[in-house]
Amino acid sequence: MANAPSKLPRYADRYVDYLTVERGLADHSLSAYQRDLAVYGRFLAQVGISDPIQAVRDDLVAFMAWLQAQMTPRGTPYAPSTIARTLVAVRGFHKFLVTEGLTATDPTVDLQGPRANRSLPKALSLDQVQQLLDTPADNGPAGLRDRVMLEILYSSGLRITELVDLDVDDVDLDSHTLRCRGKGNRERVVPFGRPAAAAVEAWLVRGRPSWPTTTPALLCNARGGRLTRQGAWKLLKQCAERAGLESRVSPHTLRHSFATHLLTGGADVRVVQELLGHASVNTTQIYTRVTDQHLRSVYQQAHPRSRVETAGAFELRAAEAATLSQT
C-alpha cells in the first residue's frame, strides 16, 4: 500500500507565509527555512509519517541521529552548526502548528541538539583594511562604485543585503548617516565617516549618472540594475585579490572588522549592538572575545610578569638594562 501524500509541504507553506508577514524575514532566510523543512520532510517520509502533527519526541530524537549520519554533496558529514540550524527551523515549525491550533503537543519541547561551535569572527587588521580600501584605483564609474561599497561596509558595518538594498534617498551626506533595514525588517540609522561620504559624493556626481539607470538603488551595475548580493560579493573578492589578501575575505569580514575595531578602540558593547542591528547583546558579545584575545596576546608579549621566568631573573635583566643605559 502506497504511503499517503505528505501534509508537510502545505503546512510549511503556511509557516513560511507567517515568517514573511509576521516576522519579516529576508528572502535568503526564508529559503533556508524551506530547505531545512524539506530535509525534515524527507526524513518523515522515510519513517512513514505523512502528517507532521503525528511526530512524537522519539521521532525527533531519531531525526537528529539521522541528520548526523547524512552527507553533504561534497561527501562530508553535516556540520554541528548545520544540524543546529535545521533544528531551529523544525522547532519553529512545530511551535507554529501548536499556535495555529493544528495540534496540542510540540515534540520539540526541551529537545537538546548538538552544540554548534561558535567560532570567533575573523577580523582584518587595520593595515589589511587599508590595503583593501585602496584597491579601487580606477576613477571611472566602476571604481567609484566599488569604493563606495568598501567604504560603507567597513565604515557602517552593514550586512551585504542591507548594503545592496540602500536607495539614494537613504543616505544623508549632510549628517553622514544612512537609514537601513535589517533582519526582521527593523530599521536603524547608522553613521559613516568622512572617507565614505567623499566616496558616495564622487559616485553620485561622477559615476552613477554615467550609467543608464532608473532604479533608486544607491549601488547599481553597468546595465543600470540594482547591484545584487552575489554581484557585490564577486566585486569584493576581486578587490581582496588585488590587495594581496591571501585569507578569504567576505562582506561579513568587513562587518566583523567594523565591530572588532570599535570595541578595541573602547566603544561600549551596547553601542556596537545598536550599530550592528543585533536584537540581543548576546550576539554582539562574541566580538568581545576577539578583543579579549587580542588584549591577552599584547599582555603576554609586553608584561614581564606574564612570562615564565623567576622574579630573580627579571630583576637581573632589569639590572643589566640599567647598567647598559649608563655606559
Image: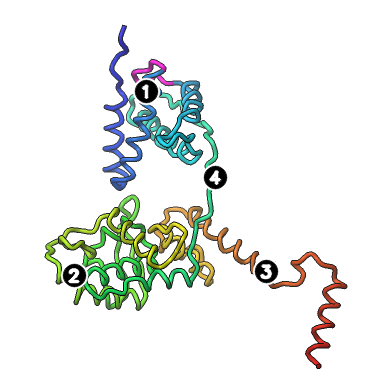
For the residues labelled 2 and 3, the Cα–Cα distance comes to 48 Å
Say which quadrant the C terminus sits in. bottom right
The local secondary structure at tag 3 comes to helix
Image height of 205 relative to 277, above or below: below
Residue type, mark 2 in image:
Arg
Q: Which residue is mark 3?
A: 299
The reply to whether discs 1 and 4 touch (Cβ–Cβ < 8 Å) is no
Relative side of 116 to 45, left or right: right
Q: Which residue is mark 2?
A: 208
* Residue at (32, 25) in percent of width and height: 8
- Determine crowd level at label 2: few under 14, some 14-19, many 20+ residues with C-alpha closer than 10 A: many
Q: Which residue is mark 1?
A: 52
Q: Which residue is mark 4?
A: 117
Mark closest to the chain's N terminus, 4 or 2:
4
* Residue at (21, 62) in percent of width and height: 220
For the residues labelled 1 and 4, the Cα–Cα distance comes to 29 Å
**What stretch of residues is rendered in magenta?**
47-55
Relative side of 303 to 200, left or right: right
The reply to whether discs 4 and 3 touch (Cβ–Cβ < 8 Å) is no
